[in-house]
Amino acid sequence: MAKKKEGSVNVSGKPEHSLDVNRDGGITKSNNGRSAATVQRLKELPSTRIMPDRPMAQDMGMFTVPQTIGSVLCCKCGILMQPNAANMCAKCLRSEVDITEGLQKHVIIIHCPECDTYLQPPRTWIKAQLESKELLTFCVKRLKNLNKVRLVHAEFIWTEPHSKRIKVKLRVQKEVLNGAILEQAYTVEYVVQDQMCESCLRVQANPDQWVAAVQLRQHVSHRRTFFYLEQLILKHDAAKYAIRIKQMDEGVDFFFSNRSHGVKFVEFLGKVTPIRSRNDKQLVSHDPKSNNYNYKYTFSVEISPICREDLICLPPKLAVSLGNFGPLVICNKVTNIIALLDPFTLRQSFLDAEQYWRSSFKALLSSTQLVEYIVLDVEPVSSEVNVGGLKYVLADVQVARLSDFGKNDTIFNVRTHLGHILNPGDYALGYDLYGANNNDIELDKYKGLVLPDVILIKKSYEEKRQKRRGKPRSWKLKSLNMEIDNTSRGKDNEEKMNSEYEQFLRDLEENPDLRFNLSLYRNKEYQPSEMASMTDGEDVPSVPLDELLADLDLSDEEEDGDDDNDSMKGGKHFLISCMV
Protein backbone atom coordinates (compact mmCIF):
# COMPACT_ATOMS: atom_id res chain seq x y z
CA MET A 1 0.00 0.00 0.00
CA ALA A 2 1.48 3.32 -1.13
CA LYS A 3 1.97 6.00 1.43
CA LYS A 4 0.07 9.31 1.02
CA LYS A 5 2.41 12.23 0.25
CA GLU A 6 2.13 15.07 2.71
CA GLY A 7 2.13 18.65 1.46
CA SER A 8 4.78 21.11 2.58
CA VAL A 9 3.93 23.41 5.44
CA ASN A 10 5.09 27.05 5.66
CA VAL A 11 6.82 27.38 9.02
CA SER A 12 8.98 30.40 8.24
CA GLY A 13 6.38 32.93 9.33
CA LYS A 14 6.57 34.79 5.98
CA PRO A 15 3.35 35.13 3.91
CA GLU A 16 3.12 33.21 0.75
CA HIS A 17 2.76 35.15 -2.54
CA SER A 18 -0.40 34.68 -4.54
CA LEU A 19 1.60 33.16 -7.35
CA ASP A 20 3.29 30.60 -5.06
CA VAL A 21 1.66 27.23 -5.25
CA ASN A 22 2.60 23.88 -3.70
CA ARG A 23 4.60 21.94 -6.18
CA ASP A 24 5.42 18.30 -6.32
CA GLY A 25 8.60 17.27 -4.59
CA GLY A 26 10.39 16.58 -7.91
CA ILE A 27 10.43 20.32 -8.95
CA THR A 28 13.47 22.24 -7.84
CA LYS A 29 12.74 25.48 -6.01
CA SER A 30 14.89 28.51 -5.37
CA ASN A 31 14.65 32.05 -3.97
CA ASN A 32 13.04 31.16 -0.63
CA GLY A 33 11.08 28.24 -1.96
CA ARG A 34 9.73 29.95 -5.09
CA SER A 35 10.12 28.38 -8.45
CA ALA A 36 12.02 30.07 -11.26
CA ALA A 37 8.80 30.64 -13.22
CA THR A 38 7.22 32.47 -10.26
CA VAL A 39 10.26 34.71 -9.82
CA GLN A 40 10.16 35.59 -13.51
CA ARG A 41 6.48 36.54 -13.29
CA LEU A 42 7.11 38.77 -10.26
CA LYS A 43 9.84 40.62 -12.18
CA GLU A 44 7.44 41.28 -15.06
CA LEU A 45 4.86 42.99 -12.76
CA PRO A 46 4.90 46.86 -13.09
CA SER A 47 6.28 48.71 -10.12
CA THR A 48 3.73 51.14 -8.60
CA ARG A 49 5.00 54.29 -6.89
CA ILE A 50 2.95 57.34 -5.73
CA MET A 51 4.71 60.55 -6.75
CA PRO A 52 3.83 63.81 -4.98
CA ASP A 53 2.28 66.63 -7.09
CA ARG A 54 4.30 69.72 -8.02
CA PRO A 55 3.10 72.10 -5.25
CA MET A 56 3.58 69.41 -2.65
CA ALA A 57 7.00 68.62 -4.06
CA GLN A 58 8.02 72.26 -3.90
CA ASP A 59 6.84 72.48 -0.29
CA MET A 60 8.90 69.42 0.58
CA GLY A 61 11.98 70.93 -1.05
CA MET A 62 12.12 68.42 -3.90
CA PHE A 63 13.65 69.39 -7.24
CA THR A 64 11.16 69.77 -10.11
CA VAL A 65 11.83 70.45 -13.76
CA PRO A 66 9.98 73.62 -14.99
CA GLN A 67 7.67 73.14 -17.96
CA THR A 68 8.10 75.58 -20.86
CA ILE A 69 6.07 76.19 -24.02
CA GLY A 70 8.18 75.85 -27.07
CA SER A 71 8.22 78.32 -29.96
CA VAL A 72 8.07 77.51 -33.65
CA LEU A 73 8.68 79.48 -36.80
CA CYS A 74 5.77 80.69 -38.92
CA CYS A 75 5.63 78.71 -42.13
CA LYS A 76 5.02 81.90 -44.15
CA CYS A 77 7.13 84.72 -42.69
CA GLY A 78 9.44 82.78 -40.35
CA ILE A 79 8.91 84.78 -37.15
CA LEU A 80 8.88 83.08 -33.75
CA MET A 81 5.40 82.26 -32.51
CA GLN A 82 3.59 79.92 -30.18
CA PRO A 83 2.54 76.75 -31.96
CA ASN A 84 -1.04 76.44 -33.21
CA ALA A 85 -2.95 74.13 -35.50
CA ALA A 86 -2.24 76.22 -38.64
CA ASN A 87 1.47 76.89 -37.85
CA MET A 88 0.95 80.48 -39.07
CA CYS A 89 1.01 83.79 -37.24
CA ALA A 90 -2.02 86.04 -37.04
CA LYS A 91 -0.92 88.35 -39.87
CA CYS A 92 -0.24 85.53 -42.28
CA LEU A 93 -3.48 83.76 -41.35
CA ARG A 94 -5.37 87.00 -41.99
CA SER A 95 -3.80 87.33 -45.44
CA GLU A 96 -4.61 83.74 -46.32
CA VAL A 97 -8.21 83.42 -45.04
CA ASP A 98 -11.15 85.90 -44.98
CA ILE A 99 -14.06 84.40 -43.03
CA THR A 100 -16.33 87.33 -43.96
CA GLU A 101 -16.28 86.36 -47.63
CA GLY A 102 -19.81 85.68 -48.80
CA LEU A 103 -21.45 87.57 -45.92
CA GLN A 104 -23.70 90.55 -46.60
CA LYS A 105 -22.11 93.97 -46.08
CA HIS A 106 -24.81 96.15 -47.69
CA VAL A 107 -28.51 95.78 -46.83
CA ILE A 108 -31.58 97.90 -47.66
CA ILE A 109 -34.25 98.29 -44.96
CA ILE A 110 -37.69 99.93 -45.22
CA HIS A 111 -38.63 102.59 -42.63
CA CYS A 112 -41.98 104.33 -42.05
CA PRO A 113 -41.25 107.97 -41.09
CA GLU A 114 -44.74 108.57 -39.66
CA CYS A 115 -44.92 105.84 -37.01
CA ASP A 116 -41.13 105.19 -36.82
CA THR A 117 -41.38 101.47 -37.65
CA TYR A 118 -39.28 99.11 -39.79
CA LEU A 119 -40.57 96.48 -42.21
CA GLN A 120 -39.87 92.87 -41.26
CA PRO A 121 -40.72 90.95 -44.45
CA PRO A 122 -43.22 90.07 -45.55
CA ARG A 123 -45.76 92.37 -43.78
CA THR A 124 -44.70 92.87 -40.17
CA TRP A 125 -43.78 96.36 -38.98
CA ILE A 126 -41.51 96.58 -35.93
CA LYS A 127 -41.27 99.75 -33.82
CA ALA A 128 -37.68 100.58 -32.83
CA GLN A 129 -35.73 103.70 -31.90
CA LEU A 130 -32.25 104.56 -33.15
CA GLU A 131 -29.39 102.92 -31.21
CA SER A 132 -31.87 100.64 -29.43
CA LYS A 133 -31.63 96.91 -28.73
CA GLU A 134 -34.74 96.29 -30.81
CA LEU A 135 -33.18 97.94 -33.86
CA LEU A 136 -29.90 96.04 -33.39
CA THR A 137 -31.77 92.73 -33.22
CA PHE A 138 -33.76 93.67 -36.32
CA CYS A 139 -30.60 94.55 -38.27
CA VAL A 140 -28.81 91.31 -37.35
CA LYS A 141 -31.82 89.19 -38.35
CA ARG A 142 -31.87 90.81 -41.79
CA LEU A 143 -28.42 89.36 -42.62
CA LYS A 144 -28.27 86.23 -44.74
CA ASN A 145 -25.68 83.41 -44.48
CA LEU A 146 -24.80 84.48 -40.95
CA ASN A 147 -25.31 80.89 -39.83
CA LYS A 148 -22.01 79.94 -41.50
CA VAL A 149 -20.08 81.76 -38.78
CA ARG A 150 -20.47 82.24 -35.02
CA LEU A 151 -21.59 85.75 -34.01
CA VAL A 152 -19.66 86.98 -30.96
CA HIS A 153 -20.52 90.69 -30.67
CA ALA A 154 -22.56 93.39 -32.43
CA GLU A 155 -22.68 97.14 -31.87
CA PHE A 156 -23.71 100.33 -33.63
CA ILE A 157 -21.24 102.72 -35.28
CA TRP A 158 -22.41 106.31 -34.97
CA THR A 159 -23.70 107.97 -38.14
CA GLU A 160 -25.56 111.19 -38.84
CA PRO A 161 -29.30 110.73 -38.21
CA HIS A 162 -30.17 112.46 -41.50
CA SER A 163 -27.71 110.39 -43.57
CA LYS A 164 -30.18 107.50 -43.94
CA ARG A 165 -27.36 105.10 -43.10
CA ILE A 166 -27.05 102.69 -40.20
CA LYS A 167 -23.71 100.98 -39.60
CA VAL A 168 -23.32 97.89 -37.42
CA LYS A 169 -19.97 96.42 -36.41
CA LEU A 170 -20.04 92.62 -36.12
CA ARG A 171 -17.40 90.30 -34.67
CA VAL A 172 -17.59 86.68 -35.87
CA GLN A 173 -15.61 83.46 -35.39
CA LYS A 174 -15.04 80.50 -37.67
CA GLU A 175 -12.86 77.37 -37.66
CA VAL A 176 -10.25 77.46 -40.42
CA LEU A 177 -7.05 75.57 -41.33
CA ASN A 178 -6.54 72.42 -39.22
CA GLY A 179 -8.91 73.47 -36.44
CA ALA A 180 -7.61 76.99 -35.75
CA ILE A 181 -10.37 79.44 -34.77
CA LEU A 182 -10.20 82.84 -36.49
CA GLU A 183 -12.01 85.88 -35.07
CA GLN A 184 -12.67 88.82 -37.37
CA ALA A 185 -14.64 92.09 -37.23
CA TYR A 186 -16.36 93.76 -40.16
CA THR A 187 -18.92 96.52 -40.77
CA VAL A 188 -22.35 96.18 -42.34
CA GLU A 189 -24.00 99.27 -43.85
CA TYR A 190 -27.79 99.51 -43.90
CA VAL A 191 -29.44 101.92 -46.31
CA VAL A 192 -32.74 103.27 -44.91
CA GLN A 193 -35.49 103.84 -47.47
CA ASP A 194 -38.61 105.70 -46.35
CA GLN A 195 -41.92 104.12 -47.20
CA MET A 196 -45.16 104.60 -45.28
CA CYS A 197 -46.90 101.55 -43.84
CA GLU A 198 -50.48 100.70 -44.78
CA SER A 199 -52.09 102.31 -41.73
CA CYS A 200 -50.14 105.56 -42.11
CA LEU A 201 -50.89 105.59 -45.82
CA ARG A 202 -54.61 105.44 -45.10
CA VAL A 203 -54.31 108.22 -42.56
CA GLN A 204 -52.43 110.46 -44.99
CA ALA A 205 -54.98 109.81 -47.70
CA ASN A 206 -57.88 110.61 -45.35
CA PRO A 207 -57.13 111.82 -41.79
CA ASP A 208 -60.67 110.92 -40.67
CA GLN A 209 -60.28 107.32 -41.76
CA TRP A 210 -60.13 105.89 -38.25
CA VAL A 211 -61.71 102.61 -37.18
CA ALA A 212 -61.97 103.02 -33.39
CA ALA A 213 -62.28 106.18 -31.29
CA VAL A 214 -62.00 106.40 -27.50
CA GLN A 215 -63.74 109.47 -26.05
CA LEU A 216 -62.31 110.07 -22.57
CA ARG A 217 -64.27 112.51 -20.39
CA GLN A 218 -64.35 113.77 -16.79
CA HIS A 219 -67.01 116.25 -15.73
CA VAL A 220 -65.03 118.48 -13.39
CA SER A 221 -63.88 122.12 -13.52
CA HIS A 222 -60.15 121.37 -13.86
CA ARG A 223 -57.81 119.14 -15.89
CA ARG A 224 -55.45 117.93 -13.16
CA THR A 225 -56.61 114.34 -13.65
CA PHE A 226 -55.72 114.45 -17.34
CA PHE A 227 -52.26 115.86 -16.57
CA TYR A 228 -51.57 112.86 -14.32
CA LEU A 229 -53.17 110.41 -16.76
CA GLU A 230 -51.04 111.79 -19.60
CA GLN A 231 -47.84 110.90 -17.70
CA LEU A 232 -49.11 107.39 -17.01
CA ILE A 233 -49.89 106.90 -20.71
CA LEU A 234 -46.41 108.10 -21.66
CA LYS A 235 -44.64 105.86 -19.14
CA HIS A 236 -46.50 102.71 -20.21
CA ASP A 237 -46.60 103.72 -23.89
CA ALA A 238 -50.32 102.95 -23.91
CA ALA A 239 -51.12 105.27 -26.84
CA LYS A 240 -48.42 104.00 -29.21
CA TYR A 241 -51.04 102.76 -31.70
CA ALA A 242 -53.05 105.99 -31.69
CA ILE A 243 -53.02 107.65 -35.10
CA ARG A 244 -54.36 110.92 -33.74
CA ILE A 245 -54.95 112.48 -30.30
CA LYS A 246 -57.22 115.49 -29.91
CA GLN A 247 -57.76 117.57 -26.79
CA MET A 248 -61.39 118.43 -26.20
CA ASP A 249 -63.21 120.68 -23.73
CA GLU A 250 -63.72 118.17 -20.91
CA GLY A 251 -61.42 115.39 -22.04
CA VAL A 252 -59.31 113.85 -24.80
CA ASP A 253 -60.18 111.81 -27.90
CA PHE A 254 -57.92 108.97 -29.07
CA PHE A 255 -58.27 107.58 -32.60
CA PHE A 256 -57.00 104.12 -33.63
CA SER A 257 -56.79 102.27 -36.95
CA ASN A 258 -57.84 98.96 -35.38
CA ARG A 259 -60.64 98.05 -33.00
CA SER A 260 -58.39 95.80 -30.91
CA HIS A 261 -56.08 98.74 -30.19
CA GLY A 262 -59.03 100.75 -28.89
CA VAL A 263 -60.18 97.88 -26.67
CA LYS A 264 -56.67 97.48 -25.26
CA PHE A 265 -56.48 101.19 -24.47
CA VAL A 266 -59.81 101.11 -22.62
CA GLU A 267 -58.55 98.16 -20.58
CA PHE A 268 -55.47 100.17 -19.63
CA LEU A 269 -57.63 103.08 -18.47
CA GLY A 270 -59.62 100.72 -16.27
CA LYS A 271 -56.42 99.64 -14.49
CA VAL A 272 -55.29 103.16 -13.54
CA THR A 273 -58.54 105.11 -12.99
CA PRO A 274 -62.11 104.34 -11.82
CA ILE A 275 -64.08 104.45 -15.07
CA ARG A 276 -67.26 103.22 -16.69
CA SER A 277 -67.54 102.74 -20.44
CA ARG A 278 -69.96 101.87 -23.17
CA ASN A 279 -69.34 101.19 -26.86
CA ASP A 280 -71.24 101.49 -30.09
CA LYS A 281 -70.62 100.87 -33.78
CA GLN A 282 -71.78 102.44 -37.03
CA LEU A 283 -71.93 100.76 -40.42
CA VAL A 284 -69.74 102.54 -42.97
CA SER A 285 -69.93 100.27 -46.03
CA HIS A 286 -71.12 96.83 -47.03
CA ASP A 287 -70.13 94.59 -49.94
CA PRO A 288 -73.01 92.13 -50.59
CA LYS A 289 -70.94 90.01 -52.99
CA SER A 290 -68.12 89.22 -50.57
CA ASN A 291 -70.31 89.80 -47.48
CA ASN A 292 -67.79 92.25 -45.95
CA TYR A 293 -68.88 94.91 -43.47
CA ASN A 294 -66.90 97.99 -42.45
CA TYR A 295 -67.75 99.54 -39.10
CA LYS A 296 -66.57 102.49 -37.06
CA TYR A 297 -66.38 101.77 -33.32
CA THR A 298 -66.76 104.38 -30.61
CA PHE A 299 -65.89 103.85 -26.94
CA SER A 300 -67.29 106.38 -24.48
CA VAL A 301 -65.25 106.37 -21.25
CA GLU A 302 -66.18 108.46 -18.21
CA ILE A 303 -63.75 108.99 -15.35
CA SER A 304 -65.07 109.35 -11.83
CA PRO A 305 -65.47 113.06 -10.88
CA ILE A 306 -63.91 112.37 -7.48
CA CYS A 307 -60.35 113.73 -7.41
CA ARG A 308 -57.58 113.85 -4.86
CA GLU A 309 -58.05 116.45 -2.06
CA ASP A 310 -61.82 116.65 -2.63
CA LEU A 311 -64.16 116.97 0.36
CA ILE A 312 -66.95 114.40 0.13
CA CYS A 313 -70.21 113.84 1.98
CA LEU A 314 -70.96 110.12 1.69
CA PRO A 315 -74.52 108.93 1.07
CA PRO A 316 -76.11 107.46 4.24
CA LYS A 317 -76.43 103.93 2.82
CA LEU A 318 -72.81 103.89 1.65
CA ALA A 319 -71.56 105.27 4.98
CA VAL A 320 -73.41 102.51 6.86
CA SER A 321 -72.09 99.81 4.51
CA LEU A 322 -68.55 101.03 5.21
CA GLY A 323 -69.04 100.65 8.96
CA ASN A 324 -70.52 104.08 9.86
CA PHE A 325 -67.64 105.76 8.06
CA GLY A 326 -67.66 109.55 7.76
CA PRO A 327 -69.86 111.12 6.58
CA LEU A 328 -67.41 114.02 5.89
CA VAL A 329 -64.28 112.46 4.39
CA ILE A 330 -61.31 113.49 2.24
CA CYS A 331 -60.16 111.72 -0.91
CA ASN A 332 -56.39 111.29 -0.43
CA LYS A 333 -55.59 108.98 -3.35
CA VAL A 334 -57.17 107.90 -6.65
CA THR A 335 -55.99 104.95 -8.72
CA ASN A 336 -58.31 102.22 -9.97
CA ILE A 337 -59.78 102.53 -6.46
CA ILE A 338 -60.72 105.62 -4.44
CA ALA A 339 -59.04 105.97 -1.01
CA LEU A 340 -61.08 107.94 1.54
CA LEU A 341 -59.79 109.30 4.88
CA ASP A 342 -61.77 110.53 7.88
CA PRO A 343 -59.74 113.56 9.09
CA PHE A 344 -61.31 113.43 12.59
CA THR A 345 -60.72 109.73 13.41
CA LEU A 346 -57.94 108.74 10.92
CA ARG A 347 -60.05 105.85 9.64
CA GLN A 348 -59.54 104.87 6.01
CA SER A 349 -61.77 103.12 3.52
CA PHE A 350 -61.61 102.15 -0.13
CA LEU A 351 -64.09 102.14 -3.01
CA ASP A 352 -63.56 100.36 -6.30
CA ALA A 353 -65.11 101.51 -9.57
CA GLU A 354 -68.13 99.22 -9.27
CA GLN A 355 -68.93 100.41 -5.74
CA TYR A 356 -68.61 104.05 -6.70
CA TRP A 357 -70.77 103.96 -9.82
CA ARG A 358 -73.44 102.06 -7.90
CA SER A 359 -73.92 105.07 -5.57
CA SER A 360 -72.43 107.75 -7.88
CA PHE A 361 -71.95 110.70 -5.53
CA LYS A 362 -70.17 113.99 -6.22
CA ALA A 363 -67.68 116.07 -4.27
CA LEU A 364 -68.99 118.60 -1.76
CA LEU A 365 -66.01 120.94 -2.41
CA SER A 366 -63.13 120.55 -4.85
CA SER A 367 -59.49 121.65 -4.77
CA THR A 368 -60.26 124.84 -6.71
CA GLN A 369 -62.16 126.13 -3.65
CA LEU A 370 -59.30 125.84 -1.15
CA VAL A 371 -58.73 128.82 1.17
CA GLU A 372 -55.38 129.75 2.71
CA TYR A 373 -55.09 129.87 6.50
CA ILE A 374 -52.33 130.77 8.95
CA VAL A 375 -51.63 128.44 11.86
CA LEU A 376 -51.59 130.15 15.26
CA ASP A 377 -51.25 127.20 17.64
CA VAL A 378 -50.89 123.41 17.43
CA GLU A 379 -51.65 120.91 20.19
CA PRO A 380 -51.18 117.20 19.32
CA VAL A 381 -53.95 114.88 20.50
CA SER A 382 -52.62 111.45 19.45
CA SER A 383 -49.33 109.82 18.56
CA GLU A 384 -48.17 109.28 15.00
CA VAL A 385 -50.36 106.82 13.10
CA ASN A 386 -49.51 105.05 9.81
CA VAL A 387 -52.56 105.00 7.55
CA GLY A 388 -52.15 103.43 4.12
CA GLY A 389 -48.39 104.04 4.09
CA LEU A 390 -48.77 107.72 5.05
CA LYS A 391 -48.14 109.18 8.51
CA TYR A 392 -50.73 111.33 10.30
CA VAL A 393 -51.09 112.89 13.74
CA LEU A 394 -54.40 114.15 15.16
CA ALA A 395 -54.06 117.66 16.59
CA ASP A 396 -56.21 120.59 17.73
CA VAL A 397 -55.18 123.61 15.68
CA GLN A 398 -56.02 127.28 15.99
CA VAL A 399 -56.15 128.98 12.58
CA ALA A 400 -57.27 132.22 10.99
CA ARG A 401 -58.03 133.13 7.40
CA LEU A 402 -55.16 134.94 5.73
CA SER A 403 -57.62 137.30 4.05
CA ASP A 404 -59.00 138.35 7.47
CA PHE A 405 -55.72 139.79 8.71
CA GLY A 406 -56.25 143.48 9.45
CA LYS A 407 -60.01 143.22 8.98
CA ASN A 408 -61.35 141.11 11.87
CA ASP A 409 -60.24 138.83 14.68
CA THR A 410 -62.06 135.66 13.58
CA ILE A 411 -60.20 132.58 14.85
CA PHE A 412 -61.20 128.95 14.29
CA ASN A 413 -60.40 125.99 16.54
CA VAL A 414 -60.43 122.83 14.46
CA ARG A 415 -59.18 119.26 14.62
CA THR A 416 -56.96 118.12 11.79
CA HIS A 417 -54.92 115.12 10.67
CA LEU A 418 -51.88 117.28 9.78
CA GLY A 419 -50.42 117.58 13.26
CA HIS A 420 -47.12 116.01 12.14
CA ILE A 421 -46.23 118.78 9.66
CA LEU A 422 -47.97 121.92 10.97
CA ASN A 423 -46.22 124.36 13.31
CA PRO A 424 -47.24 127.80 14.60
CA GLY A 425 -46.62 130.34 11.85
CA ASP A 426 -47.10 127.90 8.96
CA TYR A 427 -49.66 128.31 6.21
CA ALA A 428 -52.28 125.67 5.36
CA LEU A 429 -54.95 125.19 2.71
CA GLY A 430 -58.42 124.08 3.72
CA TYR A 431 -62.13 124.28 3.01
CA ASP A 432 -64.07 127.15 4.57
CA LEU A 433 -67.35 125.54 5.68
CA TYR A 434 -68.05 128.55 7.93
CA GLY A 435 -68.74 130.87 5.01
CA ALA A 436 -69.60 128.32 2.30
CA ASN A 437 -73.07 127.92 0.84
CA ASN A 438 -73.55 124.16 0.52
CA ASN A 439 -76.36 122.86 -1.68
CA ASP A 440 -75.67 119.14 -1.51
CA ILE A 441 -78.44 116.55 -1.58
CA GLU A 442 -76.49 114.01 0.45
CA LEU A 443 -75.66 116.58 3.14
CA ASP A 444 -79.37 117.39 3.62
CA LYS A 445 -80.10 113.75 4.41
CA TYR A 446 -78.09 113.96 7.65
CA LYS A 447 -80.36 115.70 10.16
CA GLY A 448 -78.63 117.25 13.12
CA LEU A 449 -75.14 116.96 11.58
CA VAL A 450 -72.87 119.72 12.92
CA LEU A 451 -70.38 120.85 10.31
CA PRO A 452 -66.90 122.00 11.39
CA ASP A 453 -65.88 125.56 10.52
CA VAL A 454 -62.69 124.52 8.72
CA ILE A 455 -61.27 121.26 7.33
CA LEU A 456 -57.54 121.56 6.60
CA ILE A 457 -56.26 119.60 3.61
CA LYS A 458 -52.52 120.24 3.23
CA LYS A 459 -49.67 122.51 4.16
CA SER A 460 -49.06 125.56 1.96
CA TYR A 461 -45.64 126.69 0.70
CA GLU A 462 -46.90 129.63 -1.37
CA GLU A 463 -44.95 132.30 0.52
CA LYS A 464 -41.69 130.39 0.25
CA ARG A 465 -42.27 129.70 -3.44
CA GLN A 466 -42.36 133.44 -4.18
CA LYS A 467 -38.56 133.52 -3.97
CA ARG A 468 -38.25 130.82 -6.64
CA ARG A 469 -40.89 132.20 -8.99
CA GLY A 470 -39.68 132.39 -12.59
CA LYS A 471 -36.72 130.03 -12.04
CA PRO A 472 -36.61 126.73 -13.96
CA ARG A 473 -37.01 123.45 -12.15
CA SER A 474 -34.33 120.79 -12.12
CA TRP A 475 -36.77 118.35 -13.74
CA LYS A 476 -39.33 118.28 -16.52
CA LEU A 477 -42.13 116.14 -17.93
CA LYS A 478 -42.87 114.89 -21.42
CA SER A 479 -46.20 115.45 -23.15
CA LEU A 480 -48.34 113.73 -25.76
CA ASN A 481 -48.53 115.06 -29.30
CA MET A 482 -52.12 116.33 -29.10
CA GLU A 483 -54.19 118.49 -31.38
CA ILE A 484 -56.03 121.26 -29.54
CA ASP A 485 -59.65 122.06 -30.21
CA ASN A 486 -59.64 125.83 -30.77
CA THR A 487 -63.41 126.24 -30.90
CA SER A 488 -63.79 126.93 -27.17
CA ARG A 489 -60.20 127.97 -26.44
CA GLY A 490 -59.52 131.58 -25.48
CA LYS A 491 -56.98 133.61 -23.56
CA ASP A 492 -58.72 133.06 -20.23
CA ASN A 493 -58.92 129.33 -20.83
CA GLU A 494 -55.22 129.19 -21.69
CA GLU A 495 -54.23 131.06 -18.52
CA LYS A 496 -56.42 128.74 -16.47
CA MET A 497 -54.80 125.66 -17.97
CA ASN A 498 -51.30 127.02 -17.33
CA SER A 499 -52.23 127.72 -13.71
CA GLU A 500 -53.62 124.19 -13.29
CA TYR A 501 -50.49 122.67 -14.83
CA GLU A 502 -48.29 124.68 -12.45
CA GLN A 503 -50.38 123.42 -9.53
CA PHE A 504 -49.96 119.87 -10.81
CA LEU A 505 -46.16 120.31 -10.86
CA ARG A 506 -46.26 121.59 -7.28
CA ASP A 507 -48.31 118.58 -6.20
CA LEU A 508 -45.63 116.31 -7.67
CA GLU A 509 -42.96 118.09 -5.64
CA GLU A 510 -44.94 117.94 -2.41
CA ASN A 511 -46.23 114.36 -2.70
CA PRO A 512 -43.64 111.57 -3.29
CA ASP A 513 -46.44 109.01 -3.47
CA LEU A 514 -47.99 110.88 -6.39
CA ARG A 515 -44.83 110.82 -8.51
CA PHE A 516 -44.00 107.20 -7.65
CA ASN A 517 -45.54 105.83 -10.87
CA LEU A 518 -44.36 108.67 -13.14
CA SER A 519 -41.17 109.29 -15.12
CA LEU A 520 -39.45 112.60 -14.36
CA TYR A 521 -36.50 113.73 -16.48
CA ARG A 522 -33.54 116.00 -15.83
CA ASN A 523 -33.87 119.54 -17.13
CA LYS A 524 -30.71 120.48 -19.04
CA GLU A 525 -31.54 124.18 -18.83
CA TYR A 526 -31.35 124.08 -15.03
CA GLN A 527 -28.08 125.45 -13.65
CA PRO A 528 -27.87 125.41 -9.83
CA SER A 529 -25.91 128.17 -8.11
CA GLU A 530 -24.69 128.72 -4.56
CA MET A 531 -26.48 132.08 -4.25
CA ALA A 532 -29.78 130.51 -5.28
CA SER A 533 -29.44 127.78 -2.67
CA MET A 534 -28.81 130.39 0.05
CA THR A 535 -31.72 132.65 -0.88
CA ASP A 536 -34.29 129.96 -1.68
CA GLY A 537 -36.37 128.50 1.10
CA GLU A 538 -34.90 125.31 2.43
CA ASP A 539 -38.28 123.97 3.52
CA VAL A 540 -39.80 124.08 0.03
CA PRO A 541 -40.26 120.46 -1.15
CA SER A 542 -38.47 119.46 -4.32
CA VAL A 543 -37.75 116.32 -6.33
CA PRO A 544 -34.46 114.57 -5.39
CA LEU A 545 -31.97 114.12 -8.21
CA ASP A 546 -31.82 110.35 -7.69
CA GLU A 547 -35.47 110.09 -8.81
CA LEU A 548 -34.82 111.78 -12.17
CA LEU A 549 -34.15 109.97 -15.44
CA ALA A 550 -31.72 111.10 -18.12
CA ASP A 551 -33.50 112.30 -21.24
CA LEU A 552 -31.35 110.71 -23.97
CA ASP A 553 -30.73 112.82 -27.05
CA LEU A 554 -28.32 111.74 -29.77
CA SER A 555 -27.48 115.33 -30.70
CA ASP A 556 -26.02 115.90 -27.22
CA GLU A 557 -23.52 113.10 -27.62
CA GLU A 558 -22.42 114.12 -31.10
CA GLU A 559 -19.37 116.10 -30.01
CA ASP A 560 -18.31 113.56 -27.40
CA GLY A 561 -18.27 110.68 -29.85
CA ASP A 562 -16.46 112.33 -32.76
CA ASP A 563 -12.98 111.24 -31.71
CA ASP A 564 -14.06 107.68 -31.01
CA ASN A 565 -15.96 107.29 -34.28
CA ASP A 566 -13.37 108.79 -36.64
CA SER A 567 -11.35 105.60 -36.46
CA MET A 568 -14.37 103.54 -37.51
CA LYS A 569 -15.53 105.54 -40.53
CA GLY A 570 -12.96 104.52 -43.15
CA GLY A 571 -12.46 101.14 -44.77
CA LYS A 572 -12.48 97.72 -43.14
CA HIS A 573 -11.17 97.11 -39.65
CA PHE A 574 -10.18 93.61 -38.56
CA LEU A 575 -9.60 92.16 -35.16
CA ILE A 576 -7.82 88.83 -35.64
CA SER A 577 -6.85 86.26 -33.05
CA CYS A 578 -5.80 82.66 -33.49
CA MET A 579 -6.76 80.12 -30.88
CA VAL A 580 -5.93 76.43 -30.82
Image: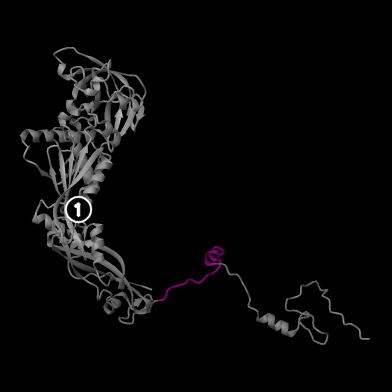
- Residue 500 at what x, y percent from top left? 15, 34
Left or right placement of residue 561 versus residue 390 in this view: left
As drawn, 454 above or below 73: above
Residue found at x 52% / y 70%: 64
Amino acid type at mark 1: Asn
Name the residue at the right extreme. 1
Q: Which residues are magenta?
A: 53-70
Which residue occupies the foreground of this view, 173 or 286?
286
Q: Which residue is mark 1?
A: 258
Tell me if residue 7 is in the magenta stretch: no
Which residue occupies the foreground of this view, 507 or 492?
492
Name the residue at the front extreme. 288
As drawn, 334 above or below 117: above
Residue found at x 28% / y 70%: 146
- Residue 341 in view in this figure: yes
Tell me if residue 61 is in the magenta stretch: yes
Name the residue at the bottom extreme. 26
- Residue 129 at what x, y percent from top left? 20, 56
- Residue 170 at what x, y percent from top left? 26, 66
Left or right placement of residue 44 versus residue 266 in this view: right
Q: Image quarter for residue 504?
A: top left
Main SS, magenta residues: loop
As drawn, 92 above or below 205: below
Q: Image quarter for residue 20?
A: bottom right
Which residue occupies the foreground of this view, 80 or 150?
150
